Amino acid sequence: MDKEMELEITGGKLHVRIRDGEAVVTSCRVMEGKVKIPDEVEGVLVTAIERKVFLSCRQLKEITLPSGLRQIGDWAFAYCGNLTHVWLPGQAISFGKGVFKDCHALAGIFTCPDDPNCQEEERQVGILLGTVPVKLETEYLLVPEEAGSKQWIWRYDVKLREFLAQPDEDGYTKMVYCGEEDIMANMDLYLAERRREKSRLCYLRLLNPTGLEEEFARELMDYLKDHTKGCISEAAWEVVYQEHGNEQDYYETFLRSGCVTEENYDAILSEMGESYPEMKGYLMRYRLEQMGGSDFFDLLSLD
């Protein structure tokens, strides 16, 4: 006999159905941004989350899923526009259709505990895994039990290389036919955003280099260099300045990729104006050190 129950959890109220020795989450009322689903309910393992449980939940920002989880239903977290972090067990999980569809803020899907002491390599893998369902739209890579393995990293980089090689206009016609022309009907705007998205992924992979081969790293840096300030597309510079204006690691990657030259240096500083004075100083110091013949990247401190 099924048993339906409601219980208070961290971040909200959970509705659960217990059947045949397993507990299934059937709905959840999110009251705070950070939610933790318990591993057990009345001594029974929580093993599944039904379809659409968190669908379009704008309050949800972070969620920790139970250690015995084996199944997540269709669209369980779809359209959760503010969801940034997911913690789940590093074991085989059956994912339904569109589980994280349009979760554009998703910054990571982590198999390590929600713990600041999580190892750096595990943190990097979680960030890469977070790009799989939304940015790369590659369901076959959404395998927590394999994430971080040598084979998984290789497959991830193959998919990323394929994504970068796709013509920028791919998907535009389909988008218009689907009635989304009011969102981004202008081809130029669409192409600009596609190039920014490719640049974002290049930065993300270079900043999370676990298992990254030198040859592919060079390809990623070459893409950024081909889309820097002064090029036909300035996507690599736009992502740094407009989205990560005061984050030194992005500027460092921008510099390492050869994106700052004598030809575009003045234009970059002019566009920055009075914004982000520390980063502007960082770029000025880079130029000075480079002209002086020393290794700037041995002196990363802004002191």
Image: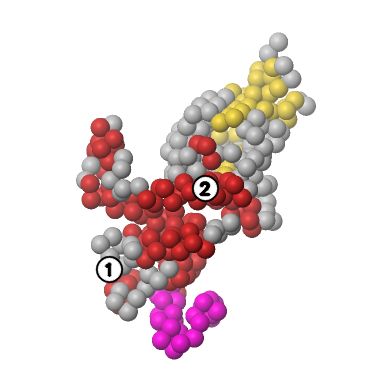
Give the quadrant of residue 287.
bottom left
In the image, what residue occupies the spot 69% across and 17% down?
19
The kind of secondary structure the magenta stretch mainly shows is helix
Residue 155 position (above or below residue 226) = above
Residue highlighted by disc 1? 230
Residue 41 location (% of width, % of height): 72, 27
Q: Is tag 1's residue or tag 2's residue first in the polypeptide sequence?
A: 2
Residue 25 location (% of width, % of height): 62, 26
In the image, what residue occupies the spot 71% across and 22% down?
22
Number of residues whose C-alpha sits closer than 10 Å to that of mark 2, classed few (under 14), some (14–19) or many (20 or more): many
- The reply to whether dot 1 and dot 2 touch (C-beta < 8 Å) is no
Residue highlighted by disc 2? 156
Residue 163 located left or right of residue 107: left
Q: Residue furthest top?
A: 1
In the image, what residue occupies the spot 43% across and 68% down?
257
Q: Secondary structure at mark 1?
A: loop
Residue 82 location (% of width, % of height): 47, 43
59 falls in the magenta region = no
Question: What range is drawn magenta here?
Answer: 279-303
